[in-house]
């Protein structure tokens, strides 16, 4: 059995000696966060950029990754921290034009168009930045490693070299990554294990809304989300996204369209009021179609089966389409009840009250199960003018101005759908 200062037999009486290497104090001031100046991004990062941290920002082409990071680099430079942007996909002139259009210009913001790892490290040595942005890591290669740029070996070795540089210099580094058609980060899975933070930049091309989600964060919460909007002048943060995911501008209001139901999802510590829409139409083909957008297809299929079996609402010979409003993705089970009520409303061709929200998970037996943070969800709904809510049993006292009906199962929820 091992002991301090050497090994000894079990039961032997040996003196305890001091470790050969003295323990030194760790300076935590060098690892203090630096805010980026963009509140929504700081929320996702856990407060800001940590010196020496390596962040991987992944997203589809054209979603706005380069625009966001150029803004981050400009604000870092304006705050007195020199920033270096390495672009491997665009020319320096193209990036300079974008910076001029969005106002991301500063004398301490440096730009270089490079694809060779050695040249990138040389720029880092010469500029001595506090923030390094590499756009993108798949375009950087080195003759010292096998394979072409973007290959598994090159991406792994280039990322490893940049991480070692970041840790040695205390350099906050952001690597832009590509994604596959399935939405996963392109390249070896090891890439996500090597970096400290993995952020996903999401958004529809036809929508101005952009969301930044943390998939991994060694320095803060990994379940936060930041909201942004794309404009001709650049990207702007949305500090209060409440109401962005509703078809009715401003919150609660009258609706004459069947198949819509409002719910409240929670992203990190932030409740978001969102709308679920459903359309039930006569099948145009022998096999009915099921189409889903913004929701989990397998979960929607389960909810349709529960509604059909427990509530006797038939979908067997109908096409069923379900979607969310505003490009938000609802992945948590708390949206189950809203999906179920929206499909019932669409099948019966009768709209739900415009001031109603539905929160709860639906089980296979038709029961409505409890979810977390119900009071925070209801408070967010009440702030937007909603006055009625269907929730699971045992949710406690509701916020002022909100009438809450606790429903134990789907049958009870459907019975209370149109209560005035």
Image: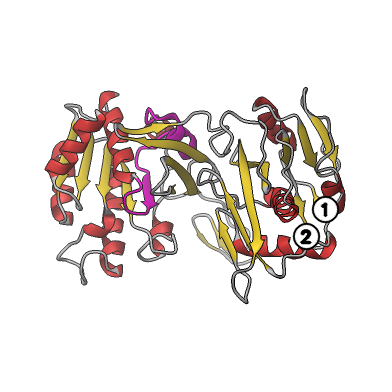
Q: Which residues are magenta?
A: 35-63
Residue 310 percent across, percent down from the top left: 84, 61
The residue at the point 74 percent across, 37 percent down is 353
The image quadrant that residue 399 belongs to is top right
Image side of residue 210 versus residue 104, left or right: right
Residue 305 percent across, percent down from the top left: 75, 65
In the rendered image, is residue 408 in sight?
yes
* Magenta-span inclusion, residue 40: yes
The image quadrant that residue 279 belongs to is bottom right
Relative depth, front residue between 400 and 46: 400
* Residues at circles 2 and 1 in contact by the CB criterion of under 8 Å: yes
Relative depth, front residue between 230 and 196: 230
Residue 176 percent across, percent down from the top left: 32, 50
Helix, strand or loop at label 2? It is: helix
Residue behind mark 2: 307
In the rendered image, is residue 365 in sight?
no
Question: Which numbered disc flags the more N-terminal residue, 2 or 1?
Answer: 2
* Magenta-span inclusion, residue 23: no
On screen, 189 above or below 287?
above
Residue furthest to the bottom: 286
On-image quarter of the C terminus = top right
On screen, 150 above or below 131?
below
Image side of residue 328 versus residue 397, left or right: left
Residue behind mark 1: 410
The residue at the point 72 percent across, 70 percent down is 316
Helix, strand or loop at label 1? It is: helix
């Amino acid at each position: 059995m091992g002991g301090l200062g050497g090994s000894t037999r079990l039961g032997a009486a040996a003196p305890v000696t001091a470790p050969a290497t003295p323990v030194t104090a760790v300076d935590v001031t060098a690892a203090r966060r630096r805010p980026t100046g963009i509140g929504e991004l700081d929320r996702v990062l856990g407060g800001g950029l940590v010196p020496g941290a390596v962040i991987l920002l992944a997203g589809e082409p054209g979603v706005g990754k380069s625009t966001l990071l150029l803004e981050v680099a400009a604000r870092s430079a304006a705050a007195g921290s020199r920033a270096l942007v390495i672009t491997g996909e665009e020319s320096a002139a193209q990036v300079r034009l974008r910076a001029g259009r969005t106002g991301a210009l500063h004398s301490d913001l440096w730009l270089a168009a490079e694809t060779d790892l050695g040249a990138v490290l040389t720029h880092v040595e010469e500029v001595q930045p506090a923030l390094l942005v590499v756009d993108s890591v798949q375009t950087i290669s080195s003759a010292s490693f096998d394979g072409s740029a973007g290959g598994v070996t090159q991406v792994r070795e280039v990322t490893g070299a940049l991480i070692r540089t970041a840790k040695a210099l205390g350099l906050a580094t952001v690597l832009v990554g590509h994604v596959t058609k399935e939405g996963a980060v392109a390249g070896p899975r090891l890439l996500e294990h090597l970096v400290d933070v993995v952020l996903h930049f999401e958004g529809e091309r036809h929508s101005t809304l952009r969301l930044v989600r943390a998939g991994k964060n060694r320095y803060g919460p990994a379940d936060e989300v930041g909201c942004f909007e794309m404009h001709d002048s650049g990207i702007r943060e949305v500090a209060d996204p409440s109401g962005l995911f509703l078809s009715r501008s401003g919150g609660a209001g009258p609706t004459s369209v069947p198949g819509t139901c409002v719910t409240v999802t929670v992203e990190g510590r932030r409740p978001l009021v969102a709308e679920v829409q459903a359309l039930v139409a006569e099948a145009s083909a022998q096999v009915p179609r099921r189409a889903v957008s913004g929701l989990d297809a397998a979960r929607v299929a389960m909810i349709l089966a529960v509604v059909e079996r427990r509530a006797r609402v038939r979908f067997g010979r109908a096409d069923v389409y379900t979607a969310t409003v505003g490009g938000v993705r609802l992945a948590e089970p708390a949206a189950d009840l809203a999906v179920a009520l929206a499909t019932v409303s669409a099948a019966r061709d009768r709209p739900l009250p415009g001031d109603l929200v539905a929160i709860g998970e639906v089980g296979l037996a038709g029961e409505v199960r409890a979810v977390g943070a119900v009071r925070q969800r209801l408070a967010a709904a009440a702030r937007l003018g909603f006055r009625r809510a269907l929730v699971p049993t045992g949710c406690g006292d509701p916020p002022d101005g909100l009438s809450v009906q606790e429903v134990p199962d789907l049958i009870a929820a459907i019975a209370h759908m149109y209560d005035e």
